[in-house]
Amino acid sequence: MKERRFRRELRSLEAIHEFVTEFLAAHGLPDSHSFDVDLILEELFTNMVRHSREGSHDIAIALERDGRDVTIRLRDFDVQAYDVTDAPAFDIRQPLSQRRPGGMGLHLVRQIADTIRYQYADRISTITVTKRLDP
């Protein structure tokens, strides 16, 4: 598993995208797969930055390939639990005028990802996502 740490700020999204691009190239995967992986990481990283405001450590992101599956792991250190798998479902049928802000990004992650797991221990929040890549 290839892991890097990124500063807890939205400006890190560009460096995260570069990390994904390098990972895909190193594994001989086409750039066309970057959209899904980038979207998953952007949404989950952004949620960690926004919802774990007491966190002061960098956020660790790891990528691993196993055949057609890519595993994406984000770890946030010394924070309160924020279980993204327990977030309420987003109702896409609700009129725009009645929607609250937030939740659409996690909805998209749930649609794109094959599995999403959450663990919390010793004040470390870990989200692990698997995504099957089409050939």
Image: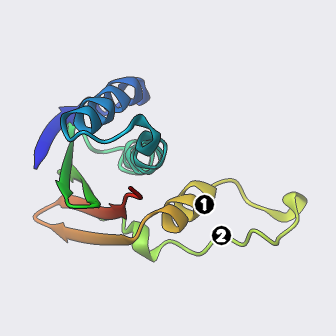
Q: Measuring from the top left, give residue 108's x and y in whole percent.
A: 57, 59
Label 1 Cα crowd, 10 Å radius (few <14 / some 14-19 / many 20+): some
Q: Distance between the residues labelled 1 and 2?
A: 6 Å
Question: Which of the two residues, 67 or 52, is positioned nearer the viewer here?
Answer: 67
Q: Single out the residue that lies furthest toward the front.
A: 135
Q: Which residue is disc 2 drawn over?
A: 90
- Indicate which disc, 1 or 2, sits on the residue closer to the N terminus: 2
Q: Position of residue 8 (x, y in %)?
A: 31, 33
Give the vertical position of 122 relative to 52 (above or below).
below
- In what quadrant of the picture does the C terminus appear? bottom left
Disc 2 is placed on an element classified as loop
Amino acid bearing label 1: Gly
Query: Label 1: which residue?
Result: 103
Along the line of sight, the residue nearer the viewer: 70 or 117: 70
Q: In which quarter of the image is residue 115?
A: bottom left
Q: Residue at x 20, y 68 (%)?
A: 120
As drawn, is 86 to the left or to the right of 7?
A: right
**Rendered location of residue 17, percent (x, y):** 37, 31
In terms of secondary structure, where does tag 1 sit? loop
| Tag 1 and tag 2, C-beta contact below 8 Å | yes
**Identity of the residue drawn at 19% across and 47% down:** 62
Q: Which colour scheme is used?
A: rainbow
Q: Quadrant of residue 26?
A: top left
Looking at the picture, which amino acid does disc 2 mark?
Phe
Q: Is residue 61 visible?
A: yes
Up-down relation of residue 65 to residue 6 (above or below):
below
Q: What residue is shown at x 41% (from left), y 58% (from top)? A: 134
What residue is drawn where x is 60% and y is 60%?
103
The answer to whether residue 7 is left or right of residue 52 is left
Bin the neighbour count of mark 2 within 10 Å (Cα to Cα): few under 14, some 14-19, many 20 and up: some
